[in-house]
């Protein structure tokens, strides 16, 4: 029986989503993208879910895009330069990006446990998560130009916001790969650590998030998503709105009582 391209394990308010095509180093194929999009749609509806961890089976997080797919599209484009194929390729890629970037639509915080190489499109999926932990020996990078193609899957949007425009320009122009420690120093990942601890640490972080008030955490994620385009006054209005929602939630009363009683809060999400 064919193994599923995606494995999902749920427990204690946490879902671990594992890319499961180790023979192809978890290549970002269209089929994998469809599986991820369907899974994210399902997870987004789970009100009991507090955090999501993404990782890869085998020795890679994801070594990048489906080269056979790119080759086929390139052949079609060269056979019809400037013709209808250009629009078809453009529209396909825009839909393809959306499949993988569905991780950004989750209301729960997402943590990329980069257990091995995350290159090209694979790196883009990690960058789309809220938090990234990487193995010391993992190679991360956006090697699009070294393949002769423009970066995609939001690489030119996410990377400058994480590492700044100058570092982003260097990495995107050259396609240079970084190992975990340099990626952490640059801000591409939150921190690097030994490979055998990456998933363990990601799950521990997810558990810490799961112990916080889910309404407050989800509201914080919404607010952070708005900072890319909001002015200070707009962001203050967003924060005031989100806090007004928390004033209506029983979790706030529990959190205040727990603080006064010097005990861990027991948030119900209501």
Image (spheres, rainbow, N blue to C red):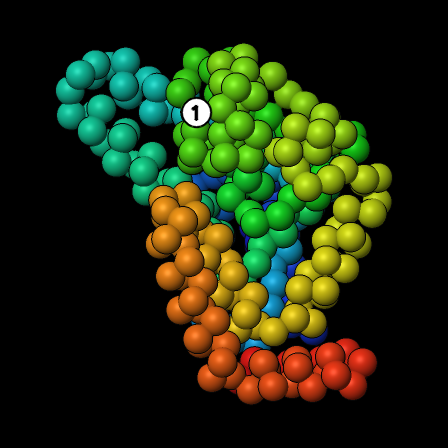
**Can residue 148 be seen?**
yes
Image coordinates for residue 144, horizontal then vertical, percent: 48, 21
Side (left or right) of 30 relative to 48: left
Q: Secondary structure at mark 1?
A: loop
With respect to residue 268, does 79 lie above or below? above
Image coordinates for residue 36, horizontal then vertical, percent: 49, 52
With respect to residue 127, does 8 lie above or below? below
Image coordinates for residue 180, horizontal then vertical, percent: 73, 31
Looking at the image, which residue is at 51% across and 66% down? 218
As drawn, which residue projects farthest toward the left? Answer: 83
Tell how many labels.
1
With respect to residue 249, does 131 lie above or below? above
Looking at the image, which residue is at 28% across and 21% down? 76
Looking at the image, which residue is at 54% across and 15% down? 170
Q: Nearer the viewer, residue 50 or 116?
A: 50
As drawn, which residue projects farthest toward the front? Answer: 233
Q: Nearer the viewer, residue 234 or 90?
A: 234
Side (left or right) of 116 relative to 228: right
Residue 250 lies in what quarter of the image?
bottom right
Looking at the image, which residue is at 72% across and 65% down? 207
Q: Would you name the residue on which mark 1 appears?
A: 151
**Mark 1 closeness class: few <14, some 14–19, many ≥20 residues within 10 Å:** some
Side (left or right) of 238 relative to 158: left
Quadrant where the N terminus is found in the figure: bottom right
Q: Nearer the viewer, residue 183 or 262?
A: 262
Residue 79 lies in what quarter of the image?
top left
Q: Nearer the viewer, residue 43 or 258?
A: 258
Image coordinates for residue 55, horizontal then vertical, percent: 66, 48
**Can residue 8 be seen?**
no
With respect to residue 58, does 259 lie above or below? below
């Amino acid at each position: 029986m064919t193994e599923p391209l995606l494995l999902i394990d749920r427990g204690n308010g946490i879902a671990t989503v594992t890319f499961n095509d180790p023979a192809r180093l978890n290549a970002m194929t269209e089929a994998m993208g469809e599986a991820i999009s369907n899974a994210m749609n399902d997870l987004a509806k789970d009100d009991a879910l507090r955090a999501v961890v993404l990782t890869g089976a085998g020795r890679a997080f994801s070594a990048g895009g489906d080269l056979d797919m790119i080759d086929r599209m390139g052949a079609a484009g060269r056979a019809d330069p400037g013709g209808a194929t250009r629009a078809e390729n453009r529209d396909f890629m825009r839909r393809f990006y959306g499949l993988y970037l569905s991780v950004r639509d989750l209301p729960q915080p997402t943590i990329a446990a980069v257990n091995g190489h995350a290159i090209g499109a694979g790196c883009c999926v990690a960058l789309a998560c809220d938090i990234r932990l990487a193995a010391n020996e993992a190679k991360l990078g956006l090697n699009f130009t070294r393949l002769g193609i423009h970066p995609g899957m939001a690489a030119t949007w996410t990377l400058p916001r994480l590492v700044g425009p100058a570092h982003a320009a260097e990495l995107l122009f050259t396609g240079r790969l970084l190992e975990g420690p340099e990626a952490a120093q640059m801000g591409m990942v939150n921190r690097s650590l030994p490979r055998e601890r990456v998933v363990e640490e990601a799950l521990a972080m997810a558990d810490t998030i799961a112990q916080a008030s889910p309404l407050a955490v989800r509201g914080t994620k919404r607010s952070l998503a708005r900072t890319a385009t909001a002015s200070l006054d707009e962001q203050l209005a967003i924060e005031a709105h989100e806090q007004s929602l928390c004033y209506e939630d029983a979790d706030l009363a529990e959190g205040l009582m727990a603080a006064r009683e010097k005990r861990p809060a027991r948030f119900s999400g209501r």
